[in-house]
Image (cartoon, coloured by chain):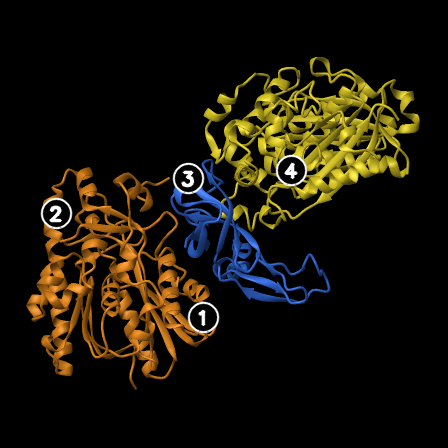
Chain colours: A blue, B yellow, C orange
Amino acid sequence: MTVARFWRKIPHRYNLIGTHCTTCGEYYFPPRQMCPTCRRDGKIESYQFEGKGEVITYTVIHTAAKGYDNQVPYNLAIIKLNEGPSLTGQVICEPEELEIGTRVRPVFRKLGEESEKGMIYYGTKFVVE
Amino acid sequence: MRDVAIIGTGCTKFGELWDRSLRDIFVEAGVSAIVDAGIQGEEIDGLYMGNMSGGRFVEQEHVGSLIADYSGLASELHVPSTRVEAACASGGLALRQGILAVASGYADIIVAAGGEKMTDVDLDTATDALAAAADREWEGIMGATFPGLYAMIARLHMHKYGTTSEQLAAVSVKNHHNGTMNPIAQFRNEITIDTVLRSNMVAEPLHMFDCSPISDGAAAVVLAPADVAKKYTDTPVYVKATTQASSPISLHDRADITTLDASVVAGQRAYKMAGLTPDDIDLVEVHDCFTIAEICAIEDLGFFKKGDGGRASEDGETAIGSRMPVNTSGGLKACGHPVGATGIKQAVVITEQLRGTAGKSQVDGAGIGMTHNVGGSGGTAVVHIFSRDR
Amino acid sequence: MKVGIVSYGVYIPRYRIKLEDIAAVWGADAASIKKGLKVNEKSVPDLDEDAITIAVEAARSAVRRGNIDTSRVGAIYTGSESHPYAVKPTSTIVAAAIGAEPVLTAADFEFACKAGTAAIQTCMGLVVSGMIDIGVAIGSDVSQGAPGDALEYTAAAGGAAYVIGSSDLAAIIEDTYSFTTDTPDFWRREGMLYPEHGGRFTGDPGYFKHVTAAANGLMEKIGSKPSDYDYAVFHQPNGKFPERVAGMLGFTNEQIKPGLVVPMLGNTYSGSCMIGLAAILDQAKEGDRIFMTAFGSGAGSDAFSITVTDKIEDIRNGAPKVHELLADPIYLDYANYAKHKGKIRV
C-alpha cells in the first residue's frame, strides 16, 4: 500500500474515527460519507468509536494473506461495536478464548509493513476484554 | 425488448493449462462456440468478455481489445468488444450484458465469453489478486483472505443452524462425484468425507477440500434473438430471466452474515421475470467457491429453508437424480474455477443439460435450468433462468 | 512554579521467556546465571508489537488514568534504543494515536536506557518556562541482545509514559540533577542488529560512577539524605546493580524493593526506571518521597527527587497497575521467542 493511501486512513485506523448520520441516527465504521438509508439527505459528522464490542463470528487463518505469513495461525473476526456497526479485525488471544459472543477491546498494533525498507502500517486489533 | 436464446456453446478444459495463454484459451472457447452455432465472423455484432484480473495475473488489461484482435475480429471487422468485471461474477455479468444487448435490439448476434489465466503467478500472488474482490482497505489490510471470509460465514451458519463439518464435506464429495462425469473438469476423482476432513485446515472450519482450486480456463456462448434462433440450431435454449443484484461489498456490513442478500434478491427478481418458482427449476449451477457457499446458495435461491442446506446436502437431496440436482458439472470445486470463466461455463452446462447432451451427468427431462454466479463474498450476484421450450 | 507528574501509564507485553530456556540453548548454567543476575524471566513483544506500539499503549494508559485532555499536550518526546524507524519519529505516531495533533512539538530521544528520563527533564523545562501546558515523556523499548550474549538474558520489552505539568500534580518533582560524560561502555552502530558492550567496564566506570555521582549530586544540591526517602528506584539492568548502588549510597533494600521489577520483567532499557517508578506510584501515599536515578550507557545519569501528593489517589486506579500487567504471562520457548524478536529472518 502506498504512503498516501495509508496516511489518508490514519485517523480511522489508529483511533476508530467513523461517521454518524444525524438524520437517521445510524453509526458507520468503516466511515461512510453517504448514508445508505438517507443518501444525499443524510447529514454526516465524524464520530470516534470506543472500540469495545462483541465477536459475532470468527475464523483461525492458517493459509495467510500476503505479508501475514509469519503470524499464522491468526484469529480474524467480525466484531459488532457497542455503537452498532460491525468491522473486520484480528483478535489476539489463544484460540480457546475466542467464541461467538466474546467481548473485546481495541489495542494498537502493527498491521503489517510494505517491505523491510518500506512503511510500517499501524492500526487497531483487538484483545479479549 | 425481445426474447434471447443461446444458439451455440464452447468451453476449454479447466485446470493447469501450462501451454496455453490467456488469449489462447479465450480464442479456443470462442471459436468452439461459433462453430457450434454455425455462424460466421461477419455476423458477430459484439463481444462481451468476463475477466476478473488480467492485470494481476498476466499484467494485461484492455482484454476486450486483445481477444477481439486474436479472434481475428478487430483488423477488418472492427467488432465492438467489452471487458466486464464483477470479481468472480465477471462471467455471469458478461452473459447478462450480452443478453441485454440482444434484447434491446442494438445487436443480433453476440458472443459472451469468460476466461481467466491464474497459474502464471505463484499461489501467494493469485490469492492476493482474488482478495481484491473483498474490501482491500477494511478487510484485506486486516489479513482477511477469501477462505477466511467464507469461513466466518460457515462458523456462524454452524452456530445458528447446527450445520456440521461433515455436511460441508458432503457438498465437496457430491461435486467431485459429478466431476468424474464431466470431461472438461479439473478434478475427476471421487473423494470421501474423510478426505475432506483430513485435508489441511485453510481457515477454520474450512479445510483445503472445502475450497475451490486455482484454475485456467475459458467458456463462450453465442446469443441470438429467440425469433430467429431455430435458423441456427434445432436446440436453442431460451433465456427466461437475467437478473443481477448488489449488496455491501464487505461481509461485516451484511444484514445477516449467513445470507447473501444479493443471491436472494437476484433469485427473486429472476423468478418474477420468468413467472416461475423454485419448484419449477429442474437443476441449478450455483457458485460453490467454498462448500459453505453452495449451502447458502441453495437456501438463498429458495430451494431449501434457511439453515437446512447442510442437511439437504448430506441427505443426497442435491445429487443427480434427486429432486434438486445442484452443480451437475462438479461445480467450482471439481470442475475448477477460472474466475472469469465460471459464469459462462455455468450457462454452457445448463444449455447442454436442456439440449439433452450432458452425457453421463444428464438430468432426465431437464426443461428449466438456473445459473447463479457470485462476486466476492456476495457483493454481486447474477442469476439466469433458461428453458428448453420457448 | 511547581512541576511534576500529572499522570503515568505503563505497557508490558504479555509474553515471557524464562532464563532457563535461554540458558538451555547455549549450554549455560541457568541456576548460576539467574543467581548472578537476580533475574528469573523477561518480557517478550508479540509479533505485531514494537517500540512504537508500546509507546502508544503506555501513552494511552497515562491519558486514560489521568483523564487528560490531549488538546493541552504541547510536547511529546519518546526515548528508545529500538525506534522502528531510524528516520521518522515515534513521537508523531504517538501524537496521532492520542489525539494530540497538530499544535505541539515533538522529537525522538536516544540515550540508551535513560532516553525516557531525559524526555521527562525536557518536558519539565518546557512546562516551567511556560512554553507548554503539559508534555508527555515516554520511554519504550523492545531491546535486543545478541544470541548467546550475556545481554540476551535480560534484554526485555516494555514502556512507560509520564504526563508532566504544573497543576493537578499527583507527584511533585522537587528537583533533578544529571551527570554526563563521554564513556563508551555500551553502543550499537547504525545498521547493526545487536549492541556491543565493554563487559565488566560497564560496571564501575559506567553504571556505578554515574549513578552515584548524580544521586549524591542531587542530595547535596537539595540537602536531602537517603533516610528522608520512603522509596528509591535505580536503573535496573539486572537485580544486582540496583541493590549494590543502593548500598553504596546508603539506601536500604526495603526502600528499593517495591520499585524493583527486573526479576520478573528483565531490563526494559528506556522503560526500566520509569516502570520501576510507576510500580512505586501504584502504592505510594500522600507525602511519600521517592528518589529515582536512571542510567544510560554512553554515559549519563538523571536523578530526581519526588514527593507524592494526595491527588495520586484520584488517578491511581484509572489504568492497569504494574503488578497487574506482570500477572498472567504467556511463556514462550526459545524458538518462538527468537521468532517474536525477529532473530529468525524470514
Q: Quadrant of the C terminus of chain C?
A: top left
According to the picture, the residue beneath numbered tag 1 turns out to be C100
Q: Which of the 4 quarters of the picture holds residue C190?
A: bottom left
Quadrant containing the N terminus of chain C in the rendered view = bottom left
In space, the residues marked 2 and 1 are separated at their CA atoms by 44 Å
Q: Does C82 sit left or right of A24 as displayed?
A: left
Query: Are dots 1 and 4 on a single chain?
Result: no
Q: Are marks 3 and 4 in contact (CB under 8 Å)?
A: no
The chain to which mark 2 is attached is C
Residue C33: numbered disc: 2
Asked whether B220 or B46 is in front, the reply is B220
Whether marks 4 and 2 lie on the same chain: no
Mark nearer the viewer, 3 or 1: 3
Marks 2 and 3 on same chain: no
Q: Secondary structure at mark 2?
A: helix
Report the disc number at residue A72.
3
Task: Check disc 4 and report the residue beneath it.
Answer: B306
Say which amino acid is labelled 4.
Lys
